[in-house]
């Protein structure tokens, strides 16, 4: 029986590769069972394999929700939306859409190589007996997430108000249909003052599902509205009608010191007047102090992993790191 030929890896031009190498922080989007998207910010460390058509980021087993979502649905998007504090001044917005694969079988040589790359992006690691123990889940027990690109959306000037250049699979011919209304979709379920405050941070992005099921992540500008946040000049690719949509706002200083992120899910009503209404909110604030940041990262990773163990979700994390109780 003849074997089916494999699809050649997607390749991209030098200008896009410079952007993929240059961002300190990117935003990832994964589908939810209800037809929405969950957004997270991660540090990709510039890791990518151009020959294989793959971009990558790493995540701690202590923050395993990302891995659970990938196991449930590997479709994913990664938005390279800012060179701020990164390694390039090239303008542009790049959204990579593809299929995620988790790698947890790194050799020690590969781990050392990633660690050296991480130091260039986020600074020297804390070392010593206490830090080696405290950060064991956050630093040492990390897995890689490779995104095999199927489509790359590229706005060379960074203005998502227009249509992008498309590399790889064409965009779906038809926009996704409007979704069924949940109960009171345009009634805010979290304090609006907090949402509006974080929406003023430097970077804000919205995530929805495209008609092919791929997450679509777009930077947006907002203003206050009685129902939540009104979008100013909505991006061209944003579909009309009502649908579940995620919103993320974040800001950060060099080496990720002073990182602050607020992630939300909610309802988007797009048309003549485009308004997003928040339903859930999760915020993380890191003080502008490296030591306090590392204490928080280590504590959060250890708590997250222990919670996964208690709830019986550890199987999704591929292996069990040594976490002292």
Image (tube, rainbow, N blue to C red):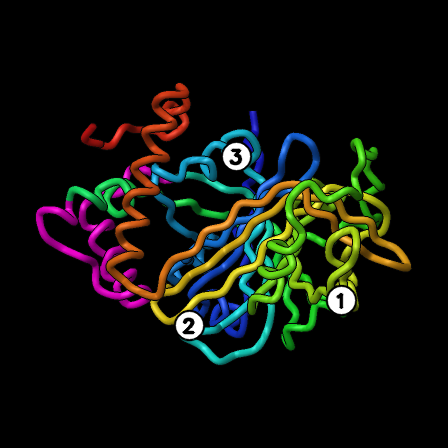
Which SS class for mark 2? loop
Picture coordinates of residue 148, whole percent (x, y): 51, 48
Please tell me which residue is depicted at 53% across the width and 55% down the height of the picture. 27
Left or right: 119 in relation to 312: left
Q: Tell me which label, 2 or 3, sits earlier in the chain.
A: 3
Q: Tell me which label, 3 or 1, sits earlier in the chain.
A: 3
Q: Which residue is mark 1?
A: 163
Please tell me which residue is depicted at 27% across the width and 28% down the height of the picture. 320
Query: Which tag is nearer the camera, tag 1 or tag 2?
Result: 2
Residues at marks 1 and 2, CA–CA distance in whole angstroms = 26 Å
Q: Quadrant of the N terminus?
A: top right
Picture coordinates of residue 96, whole percent (x, y): 57, 56
Q: Are marks 1 and 2 in contact (CB under 8 Å)?
A: no
Please tell me which residue is depicted at 28% across the width and 57% down the height of the picture. 292
| Residue projecting furthest to the bottom | 89
Q: Are marks 2 and 3 in contact (CB under 8 Å)?
A: no
| Residue projecting furthest to the right | 272
Picture coordinates of residue 227, whole percent (x, y): 78, 51
Query: Which tag is nearer the camera, tag 3 or tag 1?
Result: 3
Residues at marks 3 and 1, CA–CA distance in whole angstroms = 29 Å
Residues at marks 2 and 3, CA–CA distance in whole angstroms = 28 Å
Q: Are marks 3 and 1 in contact (CB under 8 Å)?
A: no
Which SS class for mark 3? helix
How many circles with numbers are drawn on the protein? 3
Q: Which residues are magenta?
A: 103-132
Q: Which residue is mark 3?
A: 69
Picture coordinates of residue 100, whole percent (x, y): 50, 42
Number of the label disc, if any, that sits on residue 86: 2
Please tell me which residue is depicted at 50% across the width and 59% down the height of the picture. 26
């Amino acid at each position: 029986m003849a074997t089916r030929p494999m699809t050649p890896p997607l390749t991209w031009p030098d200008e896009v590769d410079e952007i993929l190498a240059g961002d300190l922080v990117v935003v990832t989007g994964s589908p939810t069972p209800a037809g929405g998207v969950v957004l997270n910010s991660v540090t990709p460390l510039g890791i990518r394999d151009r020959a294989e058509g793959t971009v990558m980021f790493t995540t701690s087993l202590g923050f395993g929700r990302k891995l659970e979502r990938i196991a449930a649905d590997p479709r994913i998007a990664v938005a390279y939306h800012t060179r701020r504090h990164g390694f390039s001044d090239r303008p542009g917005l790049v959204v990579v859409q593809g299929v995620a694969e988790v790698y947890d079988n790194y050799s020690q040589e590969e781990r050392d190589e990633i660690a050296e790359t991480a130091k260039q992006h986020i600074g020297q690691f804390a070392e010593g007996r206490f830090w080696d123990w405290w950060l064991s889940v956050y630093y040492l027990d990390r897995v890689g997430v490779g995104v095999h690109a199927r489509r790359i959306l590229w706005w060379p000037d960074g203005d998502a108000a227009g249509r992008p250049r498309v590399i790889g699979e064409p965009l779906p011919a038809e926009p996704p249909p409007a979704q069924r209304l949940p109960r009171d979709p345009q009634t805010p379920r979290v304090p609006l003052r907090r949402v509006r405050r974080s929406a003023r941070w430097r970077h804000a992005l919205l995530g929805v599902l495209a008609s092919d099921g791929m997450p679509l992540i777009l930077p947006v500008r907002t203003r206050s509205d009685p129902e939540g946040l009104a979008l100013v000049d909505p991006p061209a690719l944003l579909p009309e009608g009502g649908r579940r949509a995620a919103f993320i706002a974040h800001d950060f200083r060099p080496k990720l010191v002073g990182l602050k992120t607020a992630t939300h899910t909610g309802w988007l009503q797009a048309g003549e007047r485009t308004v997003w209404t928040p339903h859930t909110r999760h915020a993380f604030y890191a003080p502008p102090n490296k030591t306090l940041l590392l204490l928080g990262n280590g504590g959060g990773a250890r708590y997250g992993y222990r919670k996964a163990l208690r709830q019986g979700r550890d199987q999704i994390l591929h292996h069990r790191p040594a976490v002292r109780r």
